[in-house]
Image: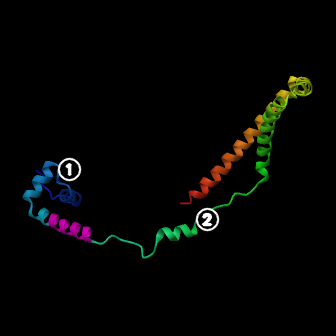
Amino acid sequence: MIDKHLTDADIQEFVLEKTNCSLDVVAHMHQCVQCQAKAETYKLLFSEIKEQPKPAFAFDLSAAVLKQVTTEKSKFSLNSLPGYFIILSVIAAIAIPSYLYKVKIIQFYKTYILGIVSGVSSLVIYLMAITFLIFVIFQCIEMYKKYQRKIDDLNFY
């Protein structure tokens, strides 16, 4: 049994959910007239709060927000030009030999084009590969920074 009166939090818990209260709180509530009076006050207060109408805006919030949202049109940027060039080069590297094979000009391709490629030293091939990798790394870093800027713009609070 509790000798002192219950706290407001204990009384509110008793009013809202008796099952979560300890046995000492329930026993005190059944014996103490002052705590019972507080509990009745809280019951009345909680019932009046439940009867209150739900707050609502006097205007259409979704329409007001959608009016202010602007969509950014995609623009052509010179920063994307190297990416387009690489994509075009890869497509050409696949399409031209396929076309030449289909037209039966493969002998020309084998003789001249492969002769040019096979004459390149391995050092030049490694330098080209390293240059390509550096380019890809810088593009990835730039893309990540752009992503971070957009996220920072969204996190304005």
| Residue 23 image position (x, y, % from top left) | 13, 48
| Residue 74 image position (x, y, % from top left) | 69, 57
- Relative to 155, is 42 on the left or the right? left
Quadrant in the picture for residue 98: top right
Give the SS element for disc 1.
helix
Give the SS element for disc 2.
loop
Q: Check residue 49 for magenta coloring.
A: yes
Vertical comparison of 4 with 104: above or below: below
Please tell me whether the stretch drawn in magenta is mainly helix, strand or loop.
helix
| Residue 144 image position (x, y, % from top left) | 66, 46
Q: Amino acid at mark 2?
A: Thr
Which of the colour schemes (rainbow, by chain, secondary structure, one colour) is used? rainbow
Quadrant in the picture for residue 152: bottom right
Numbered mark located on residue 49 in the image: none
Q: Which residue sits at x=18%, y=57%?
A: 14
**Comparing marks 1 and 2, which lies closer to the viewer?**
2
Residue farthest to the left, as pictured: 31
Vertical comparison of 1 with 40: above or below: above
- Relative to 14, is 153 on the left or the right? right
Q: Which residue is mark 1?
A: 20
Numbered mark located on residue 70 in the image: 2
Specify start and end residues of the magenta stretch as a single range.
Answer: 38-51
Q: Which residue sits at x=79%, y=48%?
A: 81
Quadrant in the picture for residue 41: bottom left
- Relative to 9, is 112 on the left or the right? right
Q: Amino acid at mark 1?
A: Asn
Q: Residues within 10 Å of mark 1 (few under 14, many from 20)?
A: few
Vertical comparison of 10 with 70: above or below: above
